[in-house]
Amino acid sequence: MVKIAVVDDNKIICSQIKEIIEKFDVRYDYDIGCDVYNSCEEFIENSQLENYELIFLDIEFPQMSGIELGNVIRNNLKNMKVQMIFISSKSTYAMDLFDAQPFNFLIKPLDEGKINECLTKFFIYYHEYNRMFEYTFENTRYRIPVNEIVYFKSRGKKVIMYTLDKSVEFYGVFGEISDELKQHFVVIKRGLMVNLKYVVNSTFSSIELKGGTFFQISKNHRENVRNRLCGL
């Protein structure tokens, strides 16, 4: 089952989103479970975050905002797995979502077509997230889950793949790997691409990855990196 949470203080909007999700599930048979919360505090107190793959999250609440909750999820709980689609009546929030790394950003009033578009995009991502990356090292073929790879770096005719606890150097074409994994990785400078799920802090010119690795972002990649981190 794929678990989705809807967090909004407007019960009508919650019902609208849940109904669209249920119709989407009937159409495509993804086995979706959907839970509704009417505040960020209620979500924190009553949910088990690790059970969710996707959250539809309103931004404006009387107390804790959706942006604050998003930052807690990413920076305090260090959860890079769950995807967040932020919702607001104001488009001006887009750049404020940088650190929360949203999957998408929807403007109210909500449109069923846009929500279906987000769900379709999410399930493409979800299946890609669980895929394996194959490479050859010392004449042996290996497979590793894409979600365990932190970043790739090119070195001449070789590519170095880094996880949280090891690195492997193998012959490969960096451009072909970046095309293959572009759903989850972003190129931040020539010959270096990082897994978006491992970005824990970022500025316009630099990023920090889980594990404490810092990289500068080259000028010609900054706009694209920011857009990817903002879910644009």
Image (spheres, grey):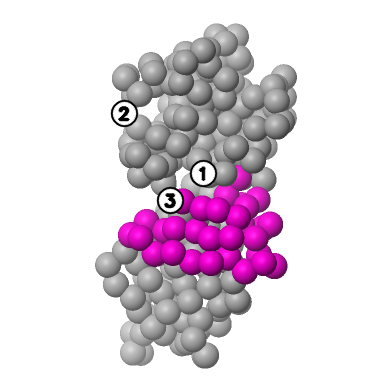
Separation (CA) of disc 1 from disc 2 = 22 Å
- Say if the magenta span includes residue 219: yes
Q: Earlier in the sequence, mark 2 or mark 3?
A: 2
Give the extent of the magenta segment. 201-230
Residue 158 image offset from top left, x and y in percent? 47, 87
Write the residue at 57% across / 11% down: 10
The amino acid at mark 2 is Gln
The residue labelled by disc 2 is 48
The amino acid at mark 1 is Asp
What number of labels is visible? 3
The residue labelled by disc 3 is 200
Label 2 close to label 3 by CB (< 8 Å) = no
Q: Which quarter of the figure is the N terminus placed in?
A: top left
Residue 168 located left or right of residue 188: left
Write the residue at 41% across / 46% down: 80
Residue 174 image offset from top left, x and y in percent? 55, 78
Separation (CA) of disc 1 from disc 3 = 8 Å
Looking at this view, is 140 or 93 the one in front?
A: 93
Residue 23 image offset from top left, x and y in percent? 59, 23
Looking at this view, is 129 or 38 the one in front?
A: 38
**Residue 99 badge:** 1
